[in-house]
Image (tube, rainbow, N blue to C red):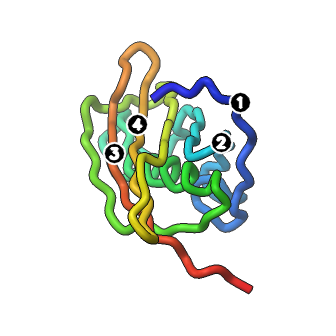
Amino acid sequence: MASNRQLSKLPPYPSCFVCGNKGLKLDFQGTDGYAEAELIPPPGFEGYEGWLHGGMTATLLDEVMAKAVSTWEEEVVTARLEIRYRLPIERGERLKLKGKVVGKKGKVFLTRGEVTAEGKGIVAQAEGRYILLPRRG
């Protein structure tokens, strides 16, 4: 899921747990249906001691796929999220998140995402469906 395109910083949503002011504060980059980010998960997001909670992995995948849609200036909510956990993620591992739009059916965007860890490769993959929110204004 590599991108050879020029990426731009994507705007954060101030109240968002992942990219906003109070949560993980992740910086996402993207363009044209593709988004990515990197992080070392901070302490406090573990299930068992030393292992990232699976729900946190799901949150990261959900966000990077929604950010891929947002590169087209669309706001969406998650309709379906399917995750395949391939390897456990240890505390302190550097992760790369990637998401891309792979299709659209009416008001539904179809996406794929992955989380890779240095030295391990892909540790989790997802497919998602996102529904357009009505325009405000």
Question: Which residue is tagged 4?
Answer: 114
Q: In the rendered view of the protein, which quadrant contains the C terminus?
A: bottom right
Q: Which residue has dot 2 on it?
A: 31
Closer to the eye: label 1 or 3: 1
Q: Specify the amino acid type for callout 4.
A: Glu
Residue at horizontal 55 percent and vertical 55 percent from the top: 69
Residue beneath label 1, please? 6
* Mark 4–mark 1 CB contact (< 8 Å): no
Q: Quadrant of residue 5?
A: top right
Disc 4 or 3, which lies upstream in sequence?
4
Determine whether label 4 and label 3 are within 8 Å by CB. Answer: yes
**Left or right of 31 on screen, residue 61:** left
Whether the residues at callouts 3 and 2 have beta carbons within 8 Å, the answer is no
Instruction: Judge left or right: residue 9 versus residue 46.
Output: right
Q: Are marks 1 and 3 in contact (CB under 8 Å)?
A: no
Q: Please determine whether, in this image, residue 40 is positioned above or below residue 18.
A: above
Of residues 35 and 32, the one nearer the viewer is 32
Front residue of 14 and 105:
105
